[in-house]
Image: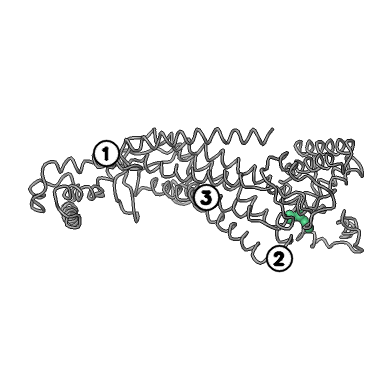
Amino acid sequence: MTDSEATGGGRNKPWGGRFSQDQTPLFERVNASLPYDHVLAPYDLRGSRAHVRMLGSVGVLSADEVATLVDGLDRVEQELTEGSLEWDIRDEDVHMALEKRLVALVGPLGGKVHTGRSRNDQVALDVQLYLRDAVLGHLERIVSFLEVLLRVAERNETVVIPGYTHLQRAQPVLLAHHLLAYVAMLERDAGRFIRWRESSWMPLGAGALAGVNYPLDRELVARELGFERVALNAMDAVASRDAAFEYLAACTMCALHLSRLAEELVLWTSQEFGIATLPDEWTSGSSIMPQKKNPDAAELVRGKAAGFLGRLVSLGALIKGLPLAYNKDLQEDKLYLFATRDELDLCLEAAAAMVDVIEVDDERGRAAAEGGFAQATDVADYLVARGLPFRDAHHVAGRLVGVALASGRALSEVSLDELVELSPLFGPDYYEVVDLDRVIAAKISPGGTSPERVREQLVLASETTVGLRRLVRRLREEDLG
Ligand code: ARG
């Protein structure tokens, strides 16, 4: 078999009318997106059905033609679901491959599916539908993760750990308070995805770039597919990738949040911190050091954030300087989008599953908070309450830390005599002030770590999560219906 026989060549392609030479197989390899864009197939078929019905309603296709085409598209979809549809790289991309299959099933009439349409607006629509679906999947996983975080926070509601700045022990906090910070981040991530969906637009009907010679009803297609608006300008509709960029930005932000949380898991489960452990099933061993138990999955959730950033920047670089309208460079956007969708779902699932099973060591957490003199700020406030200016109080508390440090004692173990030597303002009630639980209970400002404030945050976050779950369920039902 010669190469040209093997490939069929450009002359035989659906668009091959003007060509007298075959494509070289190497060109086909550079050019084809089918190896990856076949995942768009269900969205492509959905878009084609909406397009065909609309062509019927504006009188471009007859009712019989619409029925035959829709039936054919359904049959292609069935083959797709059964897995019997075969992909052939010579078909270039998913759009050509599906159209070819449709023609094979219903005959030459199948070619009418492409009336008043270009692959440029077709692929833009497919990607929008794909991303709307992807966003729903992310939202579902974010809500599940929120449920996990709230469950773990409630399960460990009295657990105290050191809160850190500069990775130095700073002030004691409730573990629940720390986890609620991630709840807040993920709620905002969910907000970004919801807003993304609300603002997404329907590009079909733009044709190649200039509009088409048919009186299309673009609003009808938009409504059938669940979009709230049409991308009106035909050039913009086919050439813009800002929605894709914003999708990647929303995913990247979420991945960065997960990366920070993953880093906490790595730290907490280290022997140095020892605040938490991961069960064996979430760790792996070393091929040389028998004692090792490594938090690889957490490290990978941390590491994968790099890929998200890379793909976001890559799409920006792809768009930059491209003249209007469609350019083949844009075909590459799918590589970034598809990888990002899959990676975010994986990271969300893995991070949630790990947090769900961490075993927290209450004693180690308390000891770490105690050992780090994390009550020193409260000692300063105690002296301020007795009239000392904060700057001086800060100094005295610092000297007290020095005394405790030099003798290897906790703040609660320094005697009253020693205290009075540092400042006559100290009294026996000092010992209540350095009691970890009291230090925490004193953080009564809204959003603070006192148990009541944390409880408030937990209740509020639970309500938000229930609301989000309801919203996501409704969006899913709308998409299916
Ligand atoms: N596979 C192409 C892509 O993903 C479809 C659009 C092709 N358009 C064109 N003018 N060749 O971008």
Foreground residue among 94 and 250: 250
Q: Report if residue 32 is visible in the image.
A: no
Image position of 250 (left or right of 335): left
Amino acid type shown at disc 2: Pro
Q: Nearer the viewer, residue 394 or 388?
A: 388
Please give the name of the residue rendered at 64% of the width and 65% of the height, measured from the top-left corner: 320
* Residue at image mark 1: 441
Image quadrant occupied by the C terminus: top right
Q: Is residue 325 something one can see in this rendering? A: yes
- What's the CA distance linking mark 2 and mark 3? 31 Å
Position of 209 with respect to 276 (left or right) is: right
Which circle's residue, 2 or 3, is located before the other in the chain? Answer: 3
Depicted 298 relative to depicted 157: above or below: below
Instruction: Residue 286: give x, y in percent of width and height.
Output: 47, 49
As measured in the structure, the alpha-carbon distance from the residue carrying label 1 to the one carrying label 2 is 61 Å
- Of mark 1 and mark 3, the one earlier in the sequence is 3
* Residue that badge 3 annotates: 255
